[in-house]
Amino acid sequence: MSPTIRRAVIPAAGLGSRLLPLTKAIPKEMLPVGDKPVIEHTVRELVESGITDITIVVSSGKSLIQDHFRPNPALVDQLRADGKVAYADAVEEVAELARRGHITYTDQHGPYGNGTPVLNAARNAGDEPVLVLWPDDVFTADVPRAQQLIHAYEQTGCPVLALMPMDPADSQRYGVPIVKEDLGDGQLRITGLVEKPKPADAPSSFAAIGGYVITPGIIAELHEQTRRWYERQKNGQPVNEIYLTDAINAYAAGHAVYGQVIRGTWYDTGNPADYLVAQMAHALADPKYGAILREQFRRLDHT
């Protein structure tokens, strides 16, 4: 049976300004979490979920991303000649991962906003649904987040947003869904999102996190937003950024949209504090390094 979703988009054109000066020369997507750069975690999640066509949307200064996934036969040959077989295998395995995901790259162009890279990559998707994952996010789960979203799409045939339970006090950090119906097993019918509401105004106790299944109707809304943006700019009127959530809200006004509560642990690496938490969590979970770190923590507690 053919997969219901085979395409995915990873928007990776952002500046990483919240992590400056660390990201001045290194793309935020290439910062390590464990023994892999953040974006590799996302690519692995997609490939493990059956995705065979990944588009990474980049901007200038992001060539390290391409370099990471590009085959490097000369390096592999040198490592094997030096007897470093495990390292050679690791380098080849990353290139094989890129081949399995059929990674291609496109430059971001158009108005500012996170909807633009999605439109850049998805405009040739035709009638196919597309997965969108941000490269700031790392998930650990028995079933990959992408696979959970695909399953929800297979059940509904409609756009799906990844959700997680939220402390209402944190509502101003997230887009919060308006829940129309709880269908059970973590699946919710939603009618839109409220961006960063005050706790008293939050319409639910869930947060929209990095993960979407978008359909041609949402891509059409992005096209319409962009058309209006250029029209307003031409007429000298104020213009806003193009946001994916705005397109989802416009679509949800007349069509079914669902949220899927994701089973797993989410790590946001887009700011210094959360990046450090992600680093520590992955290091502690590592079978080789976890015990070493715990022993070091015990020593620090006694100093």
Image (cartoon, rainbow, N blue to C red):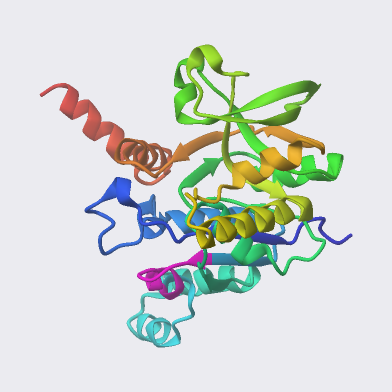
Q: Nearer the viewer, residue 112 or 14?
A: 112
List x then y, in percent, for residue 105: 54, 72
List x then y, in percent, for residue 44: 57, 57
What residue do we see at 51% from left, 36% from top?
266
Q: Quadrant of the C terminus?
A: top left
Q: Is residue 49 visible?
A: no
What residue do we see at 49% from left, 28% from top?
196
Which range of residues does the magenta coloring cover?
57-67
Q: How many marks?
A: 0
Q: Where 156 falls versus 89 (above or below)?
A: above
Q: Nearer the viewer, residue 50 or 26?
A: 26
Q: Residue furthest right?
A: 1
List x then y, in percent, for residue 150: 75, 47
Q: Where 87 falls versus 128 (above or below)?
A: below
Q: Where 160 falls versus 62 (above or below)?
A: above
Question: Is 64 a magenta residue?
Answer: yes
Question: Is 83 a magenta residue?
Answer: no
Report whether 153 appears left or right of 28. right
What residue do we see at 36% from left, 75% from top?
84
Q: Nearer the viewer, residue 294 or 210?
A: 210
List x then y, in percent, for residue 16: 35, 53
